[in-house]
Amino acid sequence: MNSEKIDLKSLTQPQLEHFLADLGKEKYRAKQILRWIYQRGATDFDQMTDLAKQFRAQLQERAFISSLEPEAAEQSSDGTRKYLFRLDDGETVEAVRIPMEEQRATLCISTQVGCAMGCAFCMTGTFGLVRNLSPAEIVNQVCAALVDGPINNVVLMGMGEPLHNLDNVVAALEILYLDDGLGYGTRRVTLSTCGLVPEIRELSKRIKVQLAVSLNATSDETRAGLMPINRRYPLSELIAACRDYARDSKQRVTFEYILIGGVNDTPADAKRLVKLLHGVRCKVNLIAYNEHEGSPFKAPEESAIKNFQEYLLQRDIVATLRASKGRDISAACGQLKGKLEKPKR
Ligand code: SF4
């Protein structure tokens, strides 16, 4: 029904201004409409009572406002809330709201259905890529979760590799940043990648966003075993791209490091990690692998976690240990998805 119409949720501000100019409308109308859509949650042009009736009818004819409603939502005892969204073509993606201290919340959203990257610790990867999400499908996960209360930070760390869907992700970020829309500042949005080096470099030219890199190993051999992308872009190239990203964006890069028992949690790993990150403005997020039924890896020993973190801290590397929140969201890119239900296909 909507195939001929334009989804206003998929437009950046210049695109919306352009669309309105075609209707003979002034630029400032874009701001008015953005406020209705994102700040007041309008999904119908009739709700936009300060627009002339004729203008609303014009919009009705040429455009629509998409939305997502969770088909299911699950809440853990610590307040973590997982949303399942069914898309127009029947595919599903998930988003997770993670409560933080002082009434704050972070939302983790998806950027693709499935993923082509095949990381060993991630179930999403084993199904391959089904398709990219559109900018509106990415933004609508945030709009839907906002119904349950404010979201302070957004992380692109759900299903999919954001940089493998670069154009749509950049458009979605532009929409999330709109002053008259949701108004997320660039410091409140984090994009997590498994390490697509040319796209990391391209990203820094196109838009500002906090960068997180799923690192998880300190040698090419171990990393390639966990993350096939390392065969294409080895650690030396990845770290060089991160060093440049931090320099050009004037932001620290976050390295996510899932500690896996006996695989990447030894003192030798900690030592190699310090060497690897030398001169990179960064911080390290350590996450203890969460062993679950049928998982291919083991959780690290408590002592290994402690020693690893201390080794980094003593060498002036900011290293935080991410606390487990909710059964489904205890880790970085991958482990979250590793716990997603097996899609029915
Ligand atoms: S961990 Fe992230 S990049 Fe790797 S396969 Fe899973 S979704 Fe893709």
Image (cartoon, grey):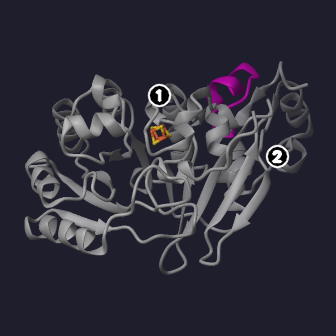
Q: Residue visible at 33% across and 64% down?
A: 300
Q: Residue furthest bottom?
A: 102
In this rendered view, identify the residue nearer to me: 133 or 227: 227
In this rendered view, identify the residue nearer to me: 21 or 1: 1
Task: Characterize the local packing of mark 1: few (<14), some (14-19) or many (20 or more) Cα atoms within 10 angstroms.
Answer: some
Q: Is residue 41 left or right of residue 272?
A: right
Residue 210 is marked as none
Query: What range of the chain is rendered magenta?
Result: 15-29
Does 18 appear in magenta? Answer: yes
SS for dot 2: loop
Q: Amino acid at mark 2?
A: Thr
Ligand 1 is within 8 Å of the C-beta of the residue at disc 1? yes
Q: Is residue 340 left or right of residue 324?
A: right
Residue 43 is marked as 2
Q: Are marks 1 and 2 in contact (CB under 8 Å)?
A: no
The correct choice, above or below, for 43 with respect to 244 in the image is: below
Q: Which residue is mark 1?
A: 164
